Amino acid sequence: MKLKGYVKIILSIMMMALVLAGCGQEAAKPADKSVYATLTDDLGRQVELSKKPARIVVTSASFLEPLEAVGGADLVVGRPDSRTKMPEFAKDLPSVGKVYQIDTEKIIACQPDLVIINKGMNEKLVDTLEANGIKALVLDMKSYADVQKEVGTLAVVTGNKEKGEQLIKTMDEKIAAVKARIPQEKRRVSIIHSTSQGLTVQLEGSIAGSVAKMLGWENVASGTKPLEKNPDAAPYSMETLVEQNPEIIFVTSMGKLSAIKASMEETMQGPAWQSIPAVREKRVYYLPQELFLLSPGIHYPEAVETMAKCVYPDAK
């Protein structure tokens, strides 16, 4: 009887071992191979891609150069009209309309499996696209931190993560080199945005505001209540500008730069403007639209260098 008891115990142990082994195999089951990537976009949405996208449409030209840099130029099949930032590879691609007037039917005609949408402009397209079975990824490319993040995201989309990491490293190094060449002193700056509709003041979240902050300068408008429909800008006030008394004024613009510059310079002849030393001493700098109107994208180091050289032209 004792022997039978031992046999039962041994059999029980063997059965337990088999059960545990089976559990271990279940735990080690590989991840679902049907998912290529799961990404979190800048609306906080989880976007799951079942495979590497083969046909991509972008609604902002700012995405084209980053895509090219991470090996995705041959994946792009549609882009918006744009007066700037159009790399050579994209010039002959089908247009899907102007940036602020994207045509959904033109997007669908491109038969994309992914549309990359610029946050703040085209989010309204998401529901229509997804209703047509087209994945949409909403990305922000405004600040340098945005660009770093989105380069990483696009590198995952194209399957070239290492290229993305190298690109970010190169941009970081270029920006660090610019900062090392200029005096490490805090300059008080104001950034005025001029259009045919009038003037606004750019805050730290704007492109120029982001660059000024990277250079360690103080935006005198920081903390000002933003416009209701634009969190990166505040209302312009001549009285407030005189009180803030910035050392340096940068002007960003939308429209024909020569006409805006002529209008601004005429306006600055007024007594209120002339009471500001930055105006009297000609420390007013007009920033190029190709770097400061829309996101400079992977050219952020050039934007940093451009702003730095306005103030320190002799910096090598």
Image (cartoon, rainbow, N blue to C red):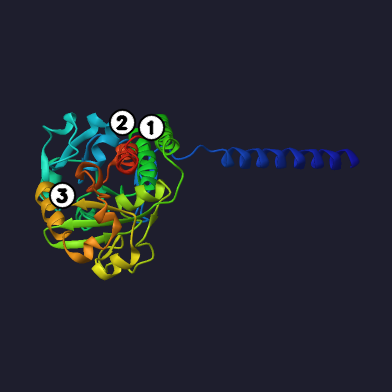
Give the amino acid at mark 3: Val
Q: Which residue is mark 1?
A: 167
Question: Is disc 2 in contact with disc 3, using a CB cutoff of under 8 Å?
Answer: no
Q: Which residue is mark 2?
A: 69
**Which image quarter: residue 65?**
top left
Question: Is disc 1 in contact with disc 2, using a CB cutoff of under 8 Å?
Answer: yes
Residue 93 in the figure: left or right of residue 192: left
Image coords of residue 132 (percent x, y) = 19, 51
- Is any part of residue 199 visible from this angle? yes
Q: Residue at x 18, y 57 (%)?
A: 194
Q: Which mark is residue 128?
A: none
Q: Nearer the viewer, residue 258 or 197?
A: 258
Depicted 204 relative to depicted 25: above or below: below
Inter-mark Cα distance, 1 to 3 = 26 Å
Quadrant in which the C terminus appears:
top left
Q: Nearer the viewer, residue 62 or 20?
A: 62
Inter-mark Cα distance, 2 to 3 = 22 Å
Residue 166 in the figure: left or right of residue 98: right
**Which image quarter: residue 229?**
bottom left
Q: Residue at x 23, y 29 (%)?
A: 74
Depicted 237 relative to depicted 289: above or below: below
Q: Residue at x 29, y 57 (%)?
A: 277
Q: Which mark is residue 99?
A: 3
Please tell me whether mark 2 sits on a helix, a strand or a loop. helix
- Is any part of residue 35 visible from this angle? no
Image coords of residue 193 (percent x, y) = 22, 56
